[in-house]
Image: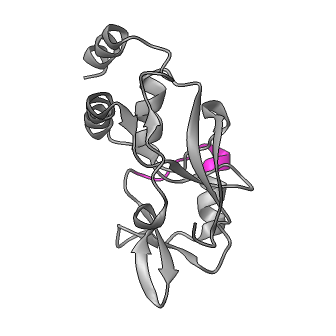
Amino acid sequence: MLKFVTRIAIVNIGDLRPHEETDMMHTYELVRDILARGVLVKPIVVDEASMVILDGHHRFEALKILGFKSIPVAMVDYFSDAIVVESWRNNIRPTKAEVIDHARSGILYPYKTTRHMVIFDGKRYHISEVVPEVNYKVVANASKSGSEVVEKLVRII
């Protein structure tokens, strides 16, 4: 495991704090993908100190829709020099402290604002590229049936 990942853990979904909004259609697609695969491939990436989600906002929302009470996360030391925050948007340049503040205040950045990168051997990688897979089984861990999920998704879209 890379140095910036402190551990993989199963945590209460209610303990996690998003810092960005999500796109509901993308979340819906992820729900379908997770159900079709039967597993969640990648964990949600969170800062261990604050429980702020750094990567995986859509997976987080999809797992909430599926009724998960606890989910796998990759805990990281956000303030490690190996992790940098960039922006997908030209007009917003968030700092790590601002990301934490947005999550704590509940005033979320717009969808796809931040991009968390890892510097490894002098190269930049998106954080999702370097976090290990967990292949967390959906059927054994979801608290809602397939029909309940479909009914909720129909109401959403």
Would you say residue 1 is visible in this rendering? yes
Would you say residue 21 is visible in this rendering? no
The prevailing secondary structure element of the residues shown in magenta is loop
Along the viewing direction, whichever of 64 and 109 lies nearer the viewer:
64
Residue 156 in percent (x, y) is at 31, 21
Along the viewing direction, whichever of 80 and 129 lies nearer the viewer:
129
Relative vertical location of residue 1 with respect to residue 155 in this rendering, above or below: below
Q: Residue 107: within the magenta?
A: yes
Span of residues in magenta: 103-110
Relative vertical location of residue 150 with respect to residue 13 in this rendering, above or below: above
Q: Residue furthest bottom?
A: 122
Relative vertical location of residue 120 with respect to residue 14 in this rendering, above or below: below
Along the viewing direction, whichever of 121 and 151 lies nearer the viewer:
121
Q: Residue 154: within the magenta?
A: no
Residue 25 in percent (x, y) is at 25, 35
- Residue 152 in the figure: left or right of residue 78: left
In the rendered image, which quarter contains the C terminus? top left
Q: Residue furthest right?
A: 49
Coloration mode: one colour
Relative vertical location of residue 146 with respect to residue 100 in this rendering, above or below: above
Residue 119 in percent (x, y) is at 50, 81
Res. 16 image quadrant: top right
Identify the residue shown where x is 65% and y is 45%: 9
Residue 3 in percent (x, y) is at 63, 73
Identify the residue shown where x is 43% and y is 42%: 135
- Residue 124 in the figure: left or right of residue 78: left
In the rendered image, which quarter contains the N terminus? bottom right
Identify the residue shown where x is 35% and y is 16%: 149
- Residue 49 in the figure: left or right of residue 157: right
Identify the residue shown where x is 44% and y is 13%: 144
